[in-house]
Amino acid sequence: LVSVFMRAGRKELKFIENSGLYFGFILGIVQAFVFALTNHSWLVLPVAGFISGYVTNWIALEMIFKPVDPINICGNKVQGLFLSHQDEVSDEFGTAVAREIMTSEQILTQLFLSPTSDKAVQIIHFHISQAIDGYGLSLGPLLPLAVGGDTYSEVKQKITELYVRELPQQIKCMSPYFDQALRLEETLVNGLKAMPPRDFESVLHPIFQEDEWLLILVGGLLGFVVGVFQILVVFGKH
């Protein structure tokens, strides 16, 4: 799911990469003034580098998802990058989910072959039993009596068990029909596009939110390493 998210939001995630240049330059100017005012203290560059990298990535992430609802600033509409491109992201995300995650084959497998599929299998048993009874009656109402009630029940049970056993193969055959009938891709894409911005954000943000702290921390650590490099190599302090 995360890889799907990364592909759907590649433009927005590219912004995070480029933000290091923009925000890093601004924070770097502040860092240079602080370094000069503290008489070139060796602690300033690593600490400031960590803060700069941390803050840069934090700002970039905030700008991707916030503000959720568009606001007007000096005549310009400002909104989180993901949300301002909702239609494009919906196309990418909905298509990828329908083709890779929530395919009709996976839905049918989960419905009929998972550990929690008892009720679905019971429904199959019921309808197959009804179908056999209907076919039997078309041959004659006395058929169950002719073959014997117990034998008739055993035959129905064996037919049903055989069908359930063959379900994995049947699902592969049924999937193209379900793809056409359910129109999952179209339904997902249109549903995402029709969502209010706040609902759209609540669908996408949690996928990425779990790893946000790591991305922010990596930015801080990279800034710290650059600060140490400046101290040891550029200014030659040991």
Image (tube, grey):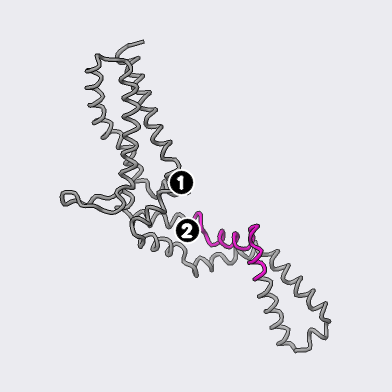
| Mark 2 burial class by Cα count in 10 Å: few <14, some 14-19, many 20+ | some
Q: Residue at x 75, y 89 (%)?
A: 141
Using the rendered view, name the quadrant where residue 58 is placed.
top left
Q: Is residue 208 above or below residue 230?
A: below
Q: Mark 1: give few (<14), some (14-19) or many (20+) Cα within 10 Å.
A: few
Amino acid type, mark 1: Ser
Residue 8 horizontal/vertical position (percent): 39, 50
Tell me: residue 143, above or below residue 40: below
Q: Earlier in the sequence, mark 1 or mark 2?
A: 1
Specify whether residue 19 is painted magenta: no
Q: Which mark is residue 3?
A: 1
Residue at 81% x, 81% y is 149
- What's the amino acid at mark 2? Ala
Percent x, y of residue 71: 23, 52
Relative to residue 123, is residue 13 drawn left or right?
Answer: left
Q: Residue at x 50, y 70 (%)?
A: 181
Which residue is pictured at 42% across the width and 54% down the height?
203
The span shown in magenta is 98-123
Q: Are marks 1 and 2 in contact (CB under 8 Å)?
A: no
Where residue 97 appears, as percent x and y from the top left, is 46, 55
Identity of the residue furthest to the left in this view: 74
Q: Residue beneath label 2, please?
A: 98
Element type where label 1 sits in the image: helix
Does residue 207 appear left or right of residue 57 in this picture? right
Element carrying mark 2? helix
Name the main secondary structure of what is drawn in magenta. helix
Residue 68 - label: none
